[in-house]
Image: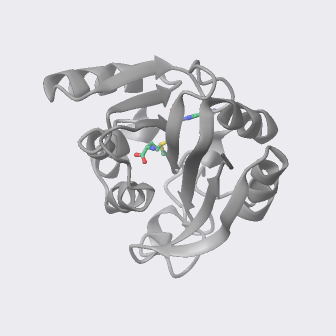
Amino acid sequence: MLRYLRHAGRMWSSEVNDAMVDQLAPTGVEHVADIGAGMGAGVAVAARRAAHVWAIEPTPYMQRLLRLRTRALRLPVTVVDGAAEATGLNDVSIDAVMAVNTMHHWVDTSTAAAELARIVRPGGRLLLADEDFDDPGHPEHHKWGSMNNTNGEEHHHHFDMVGAEQMGELFAANGFTVTIAGKVDLVGRPTLMVAADKPV
Ligand SMILES: C[S@@+](CC[C@H](N)C(=O)[O-])C[C@H]1O[C@@H](n2cnc3c(N)ncnc32)[C@H](O)[C@@H]1O
C-alpha cells in the first residue's frame, strides 16, 4: 500500500490519463473499460464522456477508494474486482479499453490479450500506455527510472516482461488491427503505447 501512497498525487489525476481519454475519445453512448484503474485518474475523466465506465482493479483498497470516489461524484462507474487476465466482463460488451501504467504489472500478457479480445465488441478499440521512466527524456526519469531509483522501492515502471512491439503482436494474433505498438511522446513523456482496433 505504501508504494501506491507515494504515487497518490498522480494516481488521483494525471495529464497522461487526461491525454489517454482524449485519444480514446469515448462518446456518450459507449462503454469503456479501464484496466488497472487504480485510484481512478482515468475513470473520473472517462466517466464524464462515456455512457458507463467499468473500472477493473485487483487491489482491494484501490477498489474501496474507487467506489468512494465515483459514488461521491455520482459517476456512471462500476468497480469490478478483476485483472487484465480475468476482467469479469461479458463477451463483446465493451466499446473501448484503456490502461495506463499497468501493463508492466500484468502477470500473463498472452491471457490478458485474449481476455481483452473477448470483451471488446467488433468495431471497438483499445489504447494501452506505460510511461517509460527509464528513458532519460522522461521528466521524472531521475525519480522513477530503474537506474536512478535509490529510494529502496522495488522498481515497477518499465516494460520488463514484454515490449510494446510484442504486446502489439499479441493483439494482432488475437484479431486486432494494430495501429501503434512502440514508443510515442504523450504530453512530453516517452511512453510505450499499443493502439488497436477490432475489425467489424
Ligand atoms: C501504477 S498503478 C496505475 C493506476 C491507474 N491506471 C493510473 O494511471 O493512475 C497500477 C495499477 O495496476 C493494478 N494491477 C496490478 N496487477 C494488475 C493486473 N494483473 N491487471 C490489471 N491491473 C493490475 C494495480 O493494482 C494498480 O492499481
Could you tell whether 120 is left or right of 6 in the image?
Answer: right
Q: Nearer the viewer, residue 109 or 144?
A: 109
Residue 104 appears at what percent x and percent y?
64, 48
Question: Taking 98 as reference, is 193 above or below it?
Answer: below
Q: Residue furthest front?
A: 200
Residue at the spot x=52%, y=33% of the render?
94
Judging depth in this view, the residue of 138 and 149 nearest the camera is 138
Residue located 28% across and 50% down the image: 13
Q: Is residue 174 above or below residue 140?
A: above
Q: Is residue 167 above or below residue 69?
A: below
Whether residue 36 can be seen here: no
Horizontally, is 38 left or right of 81 in the view? Answer: left
Task: Kindly identify the residue that appears in the image at 66 percent across and 48 percent down.
Answer: 198
**Residue 188, image x, y percentages:** 41, 77
Q: Position of residue 59 (x, y in %)?
A: 49, 24
What's the residue at 73%, 51% (across, down)?
A: 176
Residue 88 appears in view = yes
Display colour scheme: one colour
In the picture, residue 66 is in which quadrant? top left
Residue at the extreme right: 173
Name the quarter where the N terminus is drawn: top left
- Find residue 8 and report its image quarter: top left
Instruction: Residue 30: give x, y in percent of width and height.
Output: 40, 38
